[in-house]
Amino acid sequence: MERADVIILGGGLVGLSLALALDRHGLSVLVVDPADPETQVAASYDGRATAVSSSSWRMLEAIGVAERLDGVTCPIRAIRVSDGLKPGGIVFDSAEDGASSGMDDPLGMMVENRLLRGALRDAARAAERIRLLMPARPGETVRDGAGVRVALEDGRLLAAPLLVAAEGRHSPTREAADIPLARWTYDHVAIVATVAHERPHGETAYEIFYPAGPFAILPMRAGEDGRHRSAIVWSVKARDAEAMLGLPDRALAHEIGKRMGGFLGEVALAGPRFHYPLGFHHAARITAERLALVGDAAHGIHPIAGQGLNLGFRDAAALAEVLVEGARLGLDLGDAQLLGRYERWRSLDTFMVAMATDSLTRLYGVPGRAASALRRFGMGAVQRIGPLKHRLMAEARGETGELPLLLRGLPI
C-alpha cells in the first residue's frame, strides 16, 4: 500500500498546482488521473488559452512553474470592455493602476492551456514528494475515521489522511459524497479559436458584449511565423452553434472579423476550432468527511470574465495554506475543523464571483436600444469613478478579500 499526506484525484491544472504547493512545503502527494499525460499537451487536445490573473501568476512563480513558461506567455496590459462596437465603455490599464499603487504589473498573463499543463506536469515529475499515477483510474474509495483508502482498478492500494477531488465539473467523487449541486445550462456554446491578425494587439484584451453573447479577444504571443495572434472566445446561441462550426475556415474568420470591428485588420484562423457547452454549477458545500473539493469539482461559471481557472487556483492556494499550517501544528490533515477553515475561507468568494458572472451574462443578454443605453451609461460611470474602477481592476487581478500567501507571492 502506498501512503502519502494527501491523495488528489485529478491531475489537471488545479490538481497539479495544489500538489506542487504542498510538495514545496514538505507534504507528500499521490496524484491519480485516468488521462494519458502525453495526449494532454497535444494542440488537438485543448485549444483554449487562459488569462491567468496577476495573483494566480504569483502563485505559479512561488511553486516553480512560471519559470518553465518563459518565452511562451503574453502579458495583458489593458482590458477594454464595450457594449457591441459602440463608443464608450471601460478601459482597465495596468499603467494607470501602477501610477496609483506604485506597481506596474500586468493585469494577467495569457498562456495556452496545453503549455501550462505541460509545465505543471514537468514540475510535478521533478518534485521530490509527488508521485504521479497517470493514467490510473480509482475504483473503490473509503473515507472514515481511520483515514482514506483508494483502490485503483489495476489493484494498487493508496492511503492518506485526506482526499482532494480535482476531477472537474462532472466529479464522480463529489457525486459519491452526495454533495448537493445548484446547476443550470446557458443557451450558449463557446467557440474557441486562435486567429492571426494584421495589426498588433498592444497586449490588450477586449470583451465585447453582443445581445447574442459575449465576444472576447485575448492577446497571445506571436506565432512561430511572426504573425500577431489572439485567442477568441465567442459565445453563440446554441441554435446557431452547429451552423457556425460548420463554416469553412475563411468564412468563419470573416464572421470573427466582423465582430472584431476590423480594428486588428485582416483575420485568419491560426489553428483548429473547438466548442464547449456553457453552464453553471455550484456545490452546496466543498468539504465532507476527509474530503475537499477544488476547482471545477466545486464550482463552474460562465467564462464571461475569465475567472473560472483563477477561482480554482485560489482554492488550491487556500487549501495548501490550511493543510501546511495544520501539519506544522501536528494536526490530522483530514480533521473536520481544519477542513471547516477551508470551507469558510472559500465559500463566500466563490459564491460572489459565480453570482456576479451569472448576473453579467443575463444583463448583457437583454436586447434593445434602451438596455444598451443603460449598460453604456453604467460603464461610463465606472470609467469616471476612480475608486469603483480600481476596485473592479483589483477583482480582475484576483487581489480582493483575504488572499492566501501564495497569491501574494509569499511562502506559507
Image: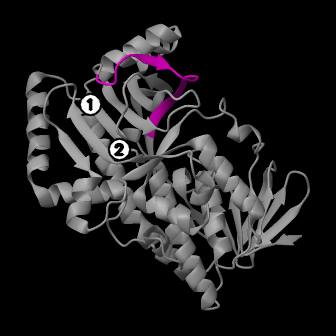
- Find disc 2 in the rendering and name its residue: 305
Residue drawn at 78 percent across, 58 percent down = 132
Residue 29 locus on image (x, y percent): 73, 69
How dense is the environment of label 2, judged by Cα within 10 Å: few (below 14), some, or many (20 and up)? Answer: some
Query: Which image quarter: residue 41?
Result: top right
In this rendered view, identify the residue nearer to me: 160 or 126.
Answer: 126
Q: Which amino acid does label 1 sit on?
A: Phe
Please give the label number shown on residue 303.
Answer: none
Residue drawn at 50 percent across, 15 percent down = 245
**Residue 10 visible, this orientation:** no
**Residue 112 visible, this orientation:** yes
Name above or below for residue 113 compared with residue 198. Answer: below
Extreme residue toward the front, this view: 226
- Find disc 1 in the rendering and name its residue: 209
Q: Does the residue at mark 2 contact the one at mark 1 (Cβ under 8 Å)?
A: no
Q: Which amino acid does label 2 sit on?
A: Ala
Residue drawn at 72 percent across, 55 percent down = 122
| Residue stretch rendered in magenta on the structure | 263-279
User: Does residue 264 belong to the magenta stretch?
Assistant: yes
User: Does residue 56 belong to the magenta stretch?
Assistant: no
In this rendered view, identify the residue nearer to me: 238 or 394.
Answer: 394
Q: Which of marks 2 and 1 is nearer the N terminus?
A: 1
Extreme residue toward the right, this view: 155
Residue 14 locus on image (x, y percent): 58, 56
Residue 71 locus on image (x, y percent): 56, 47
Tag 2, which secondary structure?
Answer: helix
